[in-house]
Image (cartoon, helix red, strand yellow):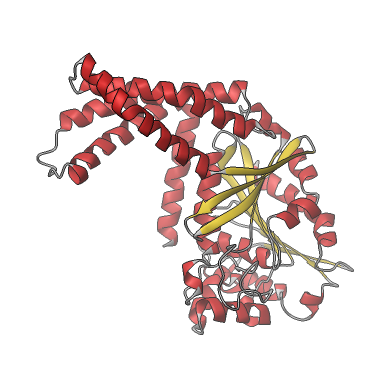
């Protein structure tokens, strides 16, 4: 499984590099391929033709529309939007969506329908009839899908960049989810791609705690790093027993539950590392560098950052954690969560335990950075167990740094004191 994930990520990274070097050619090939594939699917699934009966000349015509017209037009248009509207800001996202849907979509659709009709050998009168019959319906469908995909909830300027919060409908969690995105001032230029660091929050938190308490924006602005923060569990899903504080709501543990009734919605592992990951790279493709992604977190979120990195070798180039739950299979918090989400089979627990995962890690070189407050009550009560992870790392030669900070506790006072060092750590690796 890890090998297939690594190969998929490598293919995506190659695609991103080619897109940066030859944007018009890659966009033309991509659009032509998609339009040709779409026609072939239509012939086989909707028109019920076999592959031998398919009209490949028609498929080629559709591909030529994408290659010669669709791809170049899309690339020019989105380049103009980035240049004249920008790539970040309090209202930039909404402006770009409005201009795109009000100006480009209606115009492009007319040219597309005309091109398709011409290649199909239709008369001008027939083409006009098709446009008159189908144009408004297609345009309405396009509007609904675009506006429903991503909603800007709030935007605040801070340290020259913008702290945004978005919402979307999650297919993994089957509910509406919020996530935060800090776009540093460097993103305004629109001509460079920036590193991205995901931050995973701890028990009882939402996407709001980190962005309002840590002060990370100052350092993200200095280093030119985009910072993404998801929520900590599905929301609005009412399941008996989901309000315990360390289990259920705000306590998703960044795993994919396999035990009913949690398995239907509590899939935070796949949400963070697949759905949200891909959403960020697609929605912010003009400023997010797919080859420079890191991850960090606090407490339960530190556990999430560590297992996300170890379960997906190569996906994250850097990882750090504040007071992480390092060996959940061996502490009360983890035992409670794992038995509830995964059942009593402890072999399944090991698949979501950083201390166990690092023993089998077989990915690119990686250094783990851990910060732990010595006065942290949860550390003293053996909920976090960083020494277990350090011992496991050393047993297999995985570099690990554990900073034990005298006098510091588990709170955001602790995080805000050392967040600058952590973002500096990520910047050094991601910008190398």
Q: Quadrant of the C terminus?
A: top right
Q: Indicate the position of residue 328 as horizontal and vertical percent values.
A: 63, 76
Residue, far top: 124
Residue at position x 60%, y 22% in the image: 83
Residue positioned 57% across, 59% down in the render = 309
The answer to whether residue 106 is above or below residue 286 is above
Query: In the figure, is residue 183 to the left or right of 271?
Result: right
Image location (x, y in percent) of residue 38 = 28, 38
Q: Residue at x 55, y 49 (%)?
A: 168
Q: Quadrant of residue 2?
A: bottom left
Judge by depth and name the residue closer to the eye, 65 or 388: 65
Q: Residue 304: x percent and y percent?
A: 62, 64
Q: Is residue 274 above or below residue 181?
A: below
Total labels drawn: 0
Q: Residue furthest bottom?
A: 344
Could you say which quadrant of the image residue 34 lies in?
A: top left
Q: Quadrant of residue 181?
A: top right
Q: Is residue 202 visible?
A: yes
**Of 404 and 145, the residue lying toward us:** 145
Nearer-the-camera pick, 404 or 172: 172
From the top left corner, tell me how far across and down residue 183 is, in percent. 68, 39
Of residues 402 and 98, the one nearer the viewer is 98
- In the rendered structure, the answer to whether residue 290 lies left or right of residue 157 reads left
The residue drawn where x is 68% and y is 71% is 325
Image quadrant where one finds the N terminus: bottom left
Residue 72 visible at all: no
């Amino acid at each position: 499984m890890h090998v297939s994930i690594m190969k998929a990520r490598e293919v995506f990274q190659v695609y991103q590099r080619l897109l940066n070097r030859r944007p018009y050619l890659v966009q033309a090939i991509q659009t032509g391929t998609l339009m040709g594939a779409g026609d072939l699917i239509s012939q086989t699934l909707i028109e019920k033709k076999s592959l031998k009966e398919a009209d490949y000349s028609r498929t080629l015509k559709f591909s030529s529309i994408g290659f010669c017209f669709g791809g170049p037009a899309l690339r020019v248009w989105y380049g103009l939007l980035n240049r004249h509207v920008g790539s970040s800001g309090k209202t930039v996202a909404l402006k770009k969506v409005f201009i795109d849907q009000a100006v480009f979509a209606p115009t492009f659709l007319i040219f597309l329908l005309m091109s398709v009709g011409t290649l199909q050998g239709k008369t001008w009168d027939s083409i006009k009839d098709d446009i008159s019959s189908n144009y408004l319906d297609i345009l309405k469908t396009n509007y609904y899908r675009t506006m429903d995909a991503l909603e800007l909830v709030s935007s605040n300027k801070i340290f020259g960049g913008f702290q945004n919060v978005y919402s979307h409908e999650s297919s993994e969690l089957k509910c509406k989810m919020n996530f935060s995105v800090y776009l540093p001032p460097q993103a305004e230029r629109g001509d460079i791609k920036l590193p991205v660091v995901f931050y995973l929050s701890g028990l009882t938190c939402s996407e709001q705690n980190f962005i309002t308490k840590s002060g990370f924006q100052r350092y993200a602005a200095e280093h030119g790093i985009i910072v993404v923060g998801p929520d900590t569990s599905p929301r609005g899903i009412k399941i008996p027993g989901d309000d315990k504080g360390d289990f259920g709501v705000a306590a998703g543990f960044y795993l994919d539950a396999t035990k009913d009734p949690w398995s239907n919605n509590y899939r935070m592992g796949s949400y963070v590392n697949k759905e949200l990951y891909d959403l960020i790279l697609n929605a912010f493709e003009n400023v997010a560098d797919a080859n420079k992604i890191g991850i960090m977190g606090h407490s339960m979120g530190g556990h999430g950052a560590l297992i996300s990195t170890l379960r997906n070798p190569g996906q994250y180039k850097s990882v750090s954690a504040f007071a992480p739950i390092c060996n959940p299979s061996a502490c009360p918090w983890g035992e409670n969560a794992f038995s509830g989400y995964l059942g009593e089979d402890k072999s399944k627990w090991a698949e979501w335990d950083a201390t166990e995962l690092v023993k089998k890690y077989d990915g690119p070189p990686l250094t783990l950075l851990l910060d732990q407050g010595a006065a942290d009550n949860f550390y003293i009560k053996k909920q976090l167990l960083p020494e277990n992870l350090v011992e496991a790392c050393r047993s297999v030669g995985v570099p690990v740094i554990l900073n034990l900070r005298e006098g510091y506790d588990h709170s955001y006072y602790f995080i805000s004191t050392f967040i600058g060092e952590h973002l500096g750590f990520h910047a050094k690796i991601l910008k190398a």
